[in-house]
Image: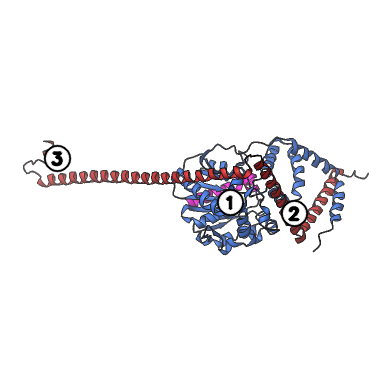
Chain colours: A red, B blue
Amino acid sequence: MSETPDFMKMSQQIYDQWEKGMSAWWDQVLENPAFLSALGENVANQSRMRGAYAKAVDENLSKMHLPTRGDLVRVARIATLLEEKVLQVEDHLLNIQDTLSRIEKEAITARIDAAETRIELRERLAQLEARLEGLEGGAAPRRTSRAKKEA
Amino acid sequence: MNLPDPLQGVELAVAGVGGAEQAALVRRGMWLHATLPRPPVGQTPHIEIHRQDKLVVRYYAPATDEGLPPVVIVPSLINRAYVCDLEPDRSLVGGLARLGHPVYLVDWGVPGPEDADEGVGYVLLTLLHRSVRRVCHHARAQKVLMLGYCQGGTLAAMYTALRPERVAGLACLATPVKFSEGGRFTDFANAGSVEAIVGPDGLVDLDIMASAFKLLDPMGNWSKYIALEAASRDPRTLKRTLARERWLEENVPLPGRFAQEFVTNAYREDRLLDGTWEVDGEVVDLGNITCPVLVTPCAKDFIAPPDACTPLATAVGSDDVTVEVLGSGHIGCVVGGFGPKVYYPLLDRWFRRVGS
């Protein structure tokens, strides 16, 4: 008994073959200088046609004393330029803010450094006083500078 | 040179009718494509820290406060920035924030005719530079880690070359720098005059942008319906496919001056690697980039092929350059399963190393 042909599979194969062939055909077309040249000319013609149409619309609007596309574009450009000016001022303010933050950070760091130095000096002074007391040993008790201060 | 025989295409089309089952799938895929609503995107919680013109800088707070340096993501100008936050579980910004990085996304927005005169200099030295300064201020940091994607990577590399003091590390994903190797994009950019791509409103028309993207992969425009039909059997996959489709559909017009400068200097004259591209009087010298650099081309990328991306590794002046070729396509590494599994952890490791 012969096997039933798988029509779905055949269909897929036919389609794949067709797609492959079409793809190769398109490749030939798209790499062809004649096609590319015609494509460029077509784009240029379309552009000219659109330009003529836009000009005609603008002229009609102008005759009716209505704002044309050109008028709207000019207003939008002014808005863009004004925004640029505002952003330049904002840039300047942000730079000042950054500078102030840096100065503030440096000032805080300097204060912390100074406080740490003071603590260190006090500790060294205390150590020196302790050593002095140790050296004097059994001699008559003398008042340390701190004791004098407290007194 | 003559065009290929058009009848050959017709013959192939007739042969395609043989795949009747596939034709039914395509028809159903087209119906789904036309009728199903697109899911919401950009859902990861964030705040806006800066706005200028159409640009918005979005901040995604890290899940854990480890004091890591800020990561600024620079996407392309020619697509919507929400590609970096397409779905909650496959979001570049969300993924990096969950890994402990404070993330800032530069969303260029959608330009209008009033932005037609904005060139590459304005984009880099005004919009991006101010964004980086605002990020530094917000994050209380002196420098940022920069991640550029596609054309955004090119812009990030150019910015790092121009303002190296602001960047502690540069990661470039699918970033073309050698534009003569740019594949079909280069062919399209060289077809016709540069002036012709700019419409009467001073912008590169959306139709031109959409057509260019469709011609990059002509058969992809057909096979996507079959993929959509296949995805419709699982609600989660369907949502993913539709989110991606939304991103592909919502093209962004480019300011005319920017487009003309970019196409001329990059795709036509390939000036970036030569070091002859001038931006507002400043020469872009990639040799000025001395911070660590991560170059990640995608092996299956036909928009920014690896040959167009890898030369960045040798062009920069940094001693610390890593090149990792990713086994994905152009957007798969960001919106596909490859991102959370491979790419985000790779970025996490690299950012932690160079940011410490």
- Where's residue B264, x and y in %? 63, 59
Structural crowding at the residue carrying mark 2, measured as other residues with C-alpha within 10 Å and reported as few (<14), some (14–19) or many (≥20):
some
Quadrant location of residue A35? Answer: bottom right
- Observer-nearest of B329 and A42: A42
> Element type at marker 3?
helix
Q: Are marks 3 and 2 in contact (CB under 8 Å)?
A: no
Q: Pointer 1: what residue?
A: B117
Name the amino acid type tagged 1.
Asp
Q: Pointer 2: what residue?
A: A42
Mark positioned earlier in the residue sequence (3 or 2): 2
Give, as a single range, the part of the protein colored magenta.
Answer: B329-356
- Observer-nearest of A10 and B191: B191
- Mark 2 belongs to chain: A
> Element type at marker 1?
loop
Quick one: which residue is furthest to the right in this view? A1
- Where's residue A60, x and y in %? 68, 42
How far apart are labels 2 and 1 at the CA level? 24 Å
- At horizontal 56% and vertical 43% (from top left) the residue drawn is A75
- Mark 3 belongs to chain: A
- Residue B300 in sight in this render: no
- In the image, which disc is placed on residue B103? none
Q: Are marks 1 and 3 in contact (CB under 8 Å)?
A: no
Q: Pointer 3: what residue?
A: A146
Name the amino acid type tagged 3.
Arg
Q: Is residue B223 magenta?
A: no
The quarter of the picture where the N terminus of chain B appears is bottom right
